[in-house]
Amino acid sequence: MAKVMEGLYYSESHEYVRVEGDFGFIGITDYAQHALGNIVYVDMPEVDDDVEAEEDFGAVESVKAASDLTSPVSGTVVEINEALEDTPELINQDAFANWIIKVQLSDKAELDNLMDAKAYEEFCEKQ
């Protein structure tokens, strides 16, 4: 069973958001990195780009497949995880510690559309 962390918000496309104040750290879940296998490249937006909930903002490529990254929330990118440019496999080592982008949240109410840890675990069991 993939690791699921309490206190995060989860989307059906297997991204998570960790909220700290007005900011959200977005990455892919442990379930997603297991499904993808060895990650070799992460395509990220630029700082100051806007992301929209349920719209793609980049991609993760593994030796098996490429998968679009879908933002679970809307906001403005304030930081990208530059370590992933040279070492994308960090996501395989710990998907929750190695977020992909940090955004300034534009509408916290969007978090209500996402799953909590328990709901996400149940969702993954049905996959």
Image: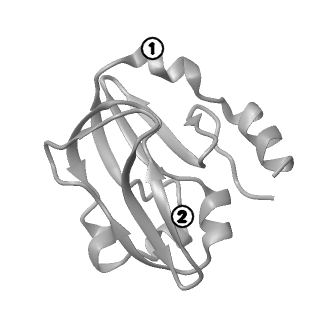
Q: Is residue 25 left or right of residue 15?
A: left
Q: Amino acid at mark 2?
A: Asp
Please tell me which residue is depicted at 55% across the width and 18% down the height of the picture. 112
Residue highlighted by disc 1: 109
Q: Is residue 117 left or right of residue 78?
A: right
Q: Nearer the viewer, residue 30 or 21?
A: 30
First in sequence, mark 1 or 2: give its number: 2
Please tell me which residue is depicted at 59% across the width and 47% down the height of the picture. 13
Q: Is residue 109 left or right of residue 45?
A: right
Position of the N terminus, as image quadrant, is bottom right
Residue highlighted by disc 2: 94
Q: Is residue 15 left or right of residue 84?
A: right
- Residue 15 percent location from the top left of the image: 53, 47
- Could you tell me which secondary element the residue under label 1 belongs to? helix
Q: In the drawing, what numbered circle is on residue 1? A: none
Position of 27 relative to 37 (above/below)? above
Q: Residue furthest front?
A: 55
Q: Amino acid at mark 1?
A: Ala
Please tell me which residue is depicted at 41% across the width and 41% down the height of the picture. 55
Residue 106 sits in quarter: top left
